Image (cartoon, rainbow, N blue to C red):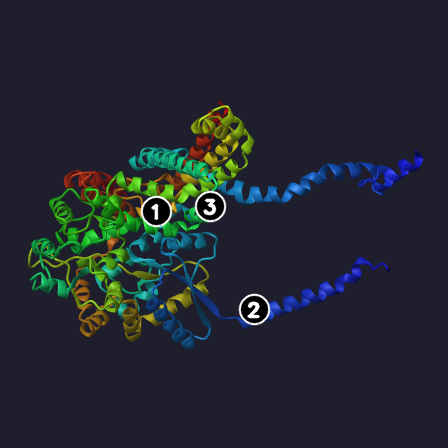
Amino acid sequence: MPLKHPLTKFPLCWKFFVCSSVAAVCLGTARSETTVEIVHYFTVPGQIQGLQDIQKDFEAANPDIKIKFTYIPFAELLSRTLQMAAVHKPPGISCIDNPDVRHVAKSGVLQDISASVEKFPTWQDTYPGPKHAVTEGTKVYGVPIGSNSLALFYNKKMLSDAGVTDPPKTWDELKEDSGKLTKSPVYGLAISAPNDEQATWQWEPFVWTNGGSLLDLTTDPAKQALQLWVDLVKSGSVSKDCMNWSQPEEGDQFIGGQAAMMVMGPWMLGQVHKSGIDFGVAPIPVPKQGIKPVVPLGGECWCVLKGDPKVEAAAVKFIEFVQDPARLETLCNTFNYISSVRSVAVKQGQANPELQPFVLQMDTARARPEEGGANYTQVSLAARTAIQQALTGQATVDAALADAAAKIKPLAEKK
Amino acid sequence: MKQLEAARTRVSPVPPAEHRPVPRRKAAWRRGLAPYTFILPILVFTLLLLAYPMFYSLTLSFQDATVDTFVSGDMPFNGFANYQQTLSTGTFWQALVNTIVFTFCSILFQFTIGFLLALFFQNRFPLKNVLIALLLIPWIAPVLTAAYTFKGLFNEVGPVNQVAHWFGIPSLPWLALPGFALAATIVANIWIGFPFNFILLYSGVCGIPQEIYEAARIDGASYWRRVGYITLPILKPVTVAVLMLGTIYTVKVFDLVWIMTGGGPANTSHLLSTYAYQVGFSLLNFGQAAAIATVIVVLILSLNLFQLLLQRK
């Protein structure tokens, strides 16, 4: 075998190197377009479809920008967003749940987009609650995709069978009607109070409507609101299992005919419709007639992350594109959300009677971080522990709330 | 003789050093290094994927790593503040006690059931292999499925309460009662884990020669005497392995409890693992979560040491 000098192999490597680098350069120049990666946790087919439709329209209108949706499980969205930012590979947009926006903004990864957002015509028309969730002083860290909140779903047939003509409007009626509607194995009312944020979220309409606050749980309004829940569970109108039901599981109870009413958000409308149940939606019952219900706001926000200025600009462009009223209405309808923009929400309510109670509640709806700001998650943790303690009977309403208030006090001051 | 020597040289796998073209010192160095190159892959793997994360987690537990400091990267060291904060929380102690109770009860029942089944399967009977395959199902089934199934079973209107009702026991909202919730997760975990104990003990039991039993039987030893003086002592090495692995598996259980109770009601059924997750990923206090994780590691190590000591005696 003739000995080959090792160097004779070089030309081949060389050729390969030249070819690949030329290819890389060519590809690089051809792709002068910007890619905006959007991380989210939406899983409902309708929501995905809505996002894809907007993506298609946007890319057609802006050929130099590409949108890339990346799904991340709900529980990991925040940590993954922070992680991506920490290794300098931030996504263009993260769809952050509204109570977390200011919490995340505190870490410094979100871009203040107030300069652009304040020029959106829809921004002036945005409800105060959703606005509050993304605003810190003069800085704006996101734009709400849409909002959701809670209302009372009721099974019309079960109500008329039990002789209840109208859905309950006050707390007294709620207790009375729930009792009437409870006939084993059917419970009068379903709520969701598991050991996570959902418990606090479902209790907030009651404590807030009564004029209470999570930051001062030792006052009467808070005690009365928790007592209402304890009474409902103790009397057997609400299943004790509510402490293990996430909201989807709670929805299953209503759809399965094991609950005559439920406290639920608009995202469940699609599923309830599909089940064929004859149902209606009413505003959250209030302590006394004449009081307006105050519900917590749900819903995610488009948040732009600090990074490549080109990507940031493209991300803002995308957000602005979505703010077109017609597009906003379609998107919110596919999401089963209420638009955070008043004129759009009013239109949605007129077209869809089941959304109307949610739309009516939007004016007084509150963003959760109004209580505790960036420390809301910890405030909520303390509050929900009190809720579960009282519901299980581990502690009295007073003791449980006093315990939680002691934990919340330093958090509120830290604000 | 000389021919033989030559032949030996020819067949010897490593030719004497003077026959090789490389200098003697280099050869010796190479020979000394060779074994290490063989373990290099596992060494790199261990350092990179096991030692580094452990070390990182340990350092994180001494840092002020929250959502505010994580991204900027300047997580200041804060001594034992994370540990102090953790140890002063009631939920932590509850979670620690829960973890110990959960582990002890799970292992006790898993092992007992597994051992009794292994004894039973020492006998010959029809459909034996089919039954063994069926018994392995809980071990094969995804924990996710098992967790949701048990959540349904322990429902207030679920099958467990219906059966209890036949015996005149009032129905209980198991997963919504402090104490009972943890008990329900233990029952579920026993169901998941006993096949693992069974199959290892069974394979150990199969390896015991029948002659020993026969000799004992001729000497007039009763069944339980044979179990106590033959089966158990011979199975000791298997038992040590089963208990050790079982402890590790059980202390780090997370998904089962997370799905069944989420640590509730009112944080009474948290294990250290679920509590660490809540602190880390819901409250975004990574430093404190790392401190709890360190406690888990220490707990696993000390439980295993304790077991080893018991076995020695």
Residue lying farthest bottom?
A60
Mark 1 falls on what kind of element? helix
Q: Mark 2 lies on which chain?
A: A
Along the line of sight, the residue nearer the viewer: B91 or B137: B137
* Residue that numbered label 1 is attached to: B258
What's the distance in space between the residues labelled 1 and 2, CA to CA? 46 Å
x and y percentages locating residue B248 in the rendered image: 45, 38
**Residue A379 showing in the rendered view:** no
Q: Residue at 56% x, 42% y: name it.
A: B46
Mark 3 falls on what kind of element? helix
Residue type at mark 1 is Trp
Q: Nearer the viewer, mark 1 or mark 2?
A: 1
* Residue that numbered label 2 is attached to: A28
Along the line of sight, the residue nearer the viewer: B143 or A242: B143
x and y percentages locating residue A119 in the rendered image: 30, 69
Residue type at mark 2 is Gly
